[in-house]
Amino acid sequence: MSVIALCSAKGSPGVTLAGQVLASVWPRPVALVDADPAGGDILWRCRTPQGGPLNPDHGLLSLAAAARRDADETNLSEHLQQTNLGQSVLVGLSSQEQLTGLGSVWTQLPSLLARHTEDVLVDCGQLSAGSAALPVIHKADAVLVVVRPDMEGVAHLRSRLFQFGKSLRMGDADGTPVLIAVATTYRDTQSATHLQQLLDSEGIPARVVGVFAEDAKGAGIFTSTRAGAPGRTLLARSARVIAQALVSVPSVEQRIGMV
């Protein structure tokens, strides 16, 4: 199994939506974990198979409570909920005010996720120095940064990769692979290539792996505001390329064994 951390460099380029879409096309069983310290969106976007709201108390909050009692016996599976799209999700915080209540559980979260028997996609929100989700990002098998290809998005991405490159040991054989996905229109055939050329020219060992195509109708299906088949959306079709790149990344154990 692998743990993949999803984050943004700045703003809201669609990390949560990216996680939902990736989970829908993932070629193996996978759980989607909402660990955005600023407050998650999975709780509000998803519905139960019966069409009702998800339980806000059964997710990250209940996982944290169980870990405080006995971290060694805490099982991520017991805190997951099923959605109407057939996904297994761990709902996150309903507000940023709940952040302090989790306390030291943030440092335990990487080991709790690593013990899960299936792949895990973790929405970590914004990649920043003060983020409570940094332990998850640093222990992940790979980090996927979602970015918009405008001047601000690329500038913040470049800044974050320089800032965190050393702690992630980017470029080392046993360091954390950093992959980039560009959120843009499907007609944009140049931005991903140009971004990779920029990263290469500056010696930043991150790999651009694809595009999350802008798709308002598809986004409506994933946010429960529109009916339809998620697998047929432009979003899902574009995400399959990114998912394949992510599942091909060796796990931490495999990379250490290669050294």
Image (spheres, rainbow, N blue to C red):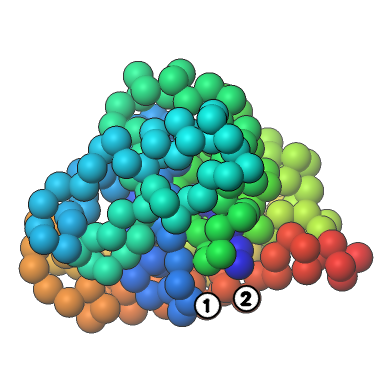
Discs 1, 2 touching: Cβ within 8 Å: yes
Q: Is residue 141 above or below residue 129?
A: below
Residue, disc 1: 244
Mark 1 residue element:
helix
Q: Please tell me how many numbered marks the rendered image carries.
A: 2
Name which residue type carries label 1.
Answer: Gln
Q: Nearer the viewer, residue 109 or 141?
A: 109
Q: Is residue 128 visible?
A: no
Residue at x 23%, y 81% (from the top left corner): 232
Mark 2 residue element:
loop
The N terminus sits in image quarter: bottom right
Q: Quadrant of residue 228?
A: bottom left
Residue 75: percent from left, percent from top: 51, 50
Residue, disc 2: 248
Residue 65: percent from left, percent from top: 45, 31
- Drawn side of residue 118 relative to residue 217, left or right: right
Name which residue type carries label 2.
Answer: Ser
